[in-house]
Image: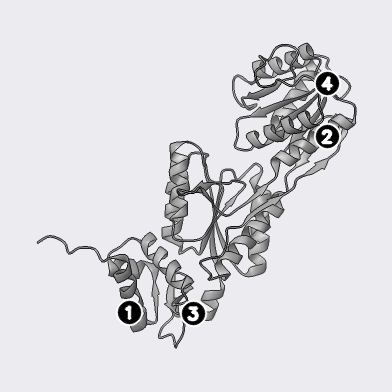
Amino acid sequence: MPDPPAALPDERRTQLLEVLRRRGVVRVNELAAELDVSVITIRRDISLLSSQGLIRRVRGGAALQSGPIAETLGGEDPATEERQLTIGMMVPSLTYYYPDVIRGVREAAAAAGARIVLRGASYHAADERRQLARLVEEHGLDGLLVTPTTTGDDGEALVRWLQGAGVPVVLVERAAAVGDYREAMESVVSDHAFGAAMAVRHLAALGHRRIGLVTRRSPTSPHVRRGWRQACEDLELDGLARDGVTPDDACVPDVDTVDQWDPGWPEAVDEVIDACVASRTTALLVHSDPEAIGLVERCRERDIRVPGDLALVTYDDEVAELCDPPLTAVRPPKAAIGRAAFALLAGRLADPDPERPTHRVTIEPRLIVRSSSS
């Protein structure tokens, strides 16, 4: 005999409520098995019914909003279960840039009595989606803090998956829009364009009129480039390649190159220095620290003085102070980003109003002046 047709969403939610009335508190996995749907579907139902005030979330499951609770999950006090949030977090690196972001999240989570389940990813959207799906299914998460890949077909598919993941999501150092009207997802980001503009204004105040840009290929680089270009235009600096004009030797470098671990880096860094000499460029903004340090070392080998012949500002301030000379750097507010991301997600979880507007938080970087620009 053919399988019976699946219940319609309203019927399924009615069945879910009836299960809760009979049993008090039920785990997500048990509800999924009993109603013959996926865990993701059950989480979406719980999220909707919770926003309507009909049920409340407890860790790992759901309970009726009012009335006595017949049983608890694992025999623990349900009030304690409800208070402790379990938040999944995924970032693309556990060794560069994101450790301070993670620290900020953990500080805020500890103050709130929440648990963080952390995963590192690989800048590959398909891999990120697999990791996130396992994270949601295995850990009974209340929400997600994610730094996803958002570009390309796989990235767009990942953003759509996040929008329908069944738990609140806050993007960390990423922004994305979904749906027919391109509605923004909730996010907390550094204002990288502002940070790049600060660097340009600092160098211009020191008298530099030809300020170039070197970036490596990363999600941050387009924002850095936007801020650099806007500041150069606002200050009417020299040597900027403009629309409709073919760049030539008179234009300052505007290079998106390989990172320093790429076999092509030695050739790339020499091309950057050659372009600086040919265009009479006297200052550079470089994203990120390892590339800036590598450029300084190559300048030393070629008898180009930093900052005497070429002033330099780096973007990230992870290891900039370790260079000789120490590098002036734009420092994104990494720990503050983590704290704000957790606070935004906690605020979303605490507010049952389905009409709550989308929040997008932007935090400004700082400029740390050291020897490489003075």
**Residues packed near mark 4 inside 10 Å, few (<14), some (14 to 19) or many (20 plus):** many
Q: Amino acid at mark 3?
A: Glu
Q: Kindly identify the amino acid type of the residue bearing the numbered disc 1.
A: Glu
Going from N to C along the chain, the mark reached first, 1 or 3, is 1
**Label 1 near label 4: C-beta < 8 Å?**
no
Q: Secondary structure at mark 4?
A: loop
Q: Residue at x 64, y 21 (%)?
A: 265
Disc 1 designates what residue? Answer: 18
| Tags 2 and 1 touching, CB below 8 Å | no
267 lies above or below 115: above
**Real-space CA distance between mark 2 and mark 1, rounded to the nearest whole angstrom:** 64 Å
- Mark 2 or mark 4, which has the lower sequence index? 2
**Lower position in the chain sequence, tag 4 or tag 1:** 1
The numbered dot on residue 49 is none
Residue 368 image-quadrant placement: top right
Secondary element at image label 2? helix
Name the residue that disc number 3 marks: 76
Q: CA distance from mark 2 to mark 4?
A: 14 Å
The residues tagged by marks 4 and 3 sit, at their Cα atoms, a distance apart of 66 Å
Q: Identify the residue at horizontal 67%, vertical 62% (top origin).
A: 108
Question: Which is in the foreground here, disc 2 or disc 4?
Answer: 2
Image location of residue 262, percent across then percent down = 59, 24
Q: Are marks 4 and 3 in contact (CB under 8 Å)?
A: no
Structural crowding at the residue carrying mark 2, measured as other residues with C-alpha within 10 Å and reported as few (<14), some (14–19) or many (≥20)? some
Q: Amino acid at mark 2?
A: Arg
Q: Position of residue 363 (x, y in %)?
A: 71, 50
In the picture of the structure, the residue carrying the numbered disc 2 is 201
Q: Kindly report the distance in space between the C-alpha atoms of the residues bearing marks 3 and 2.
A: 58 Å
Q: Earlier in the sequence, mark 3 or mark 2?
A: 3
Return the residue at label 4: 282
Mark 1 closeness class: few <14, some 14–19, many ≥20 residues within 10 Å: few
Labels 3, 2: front one: 2
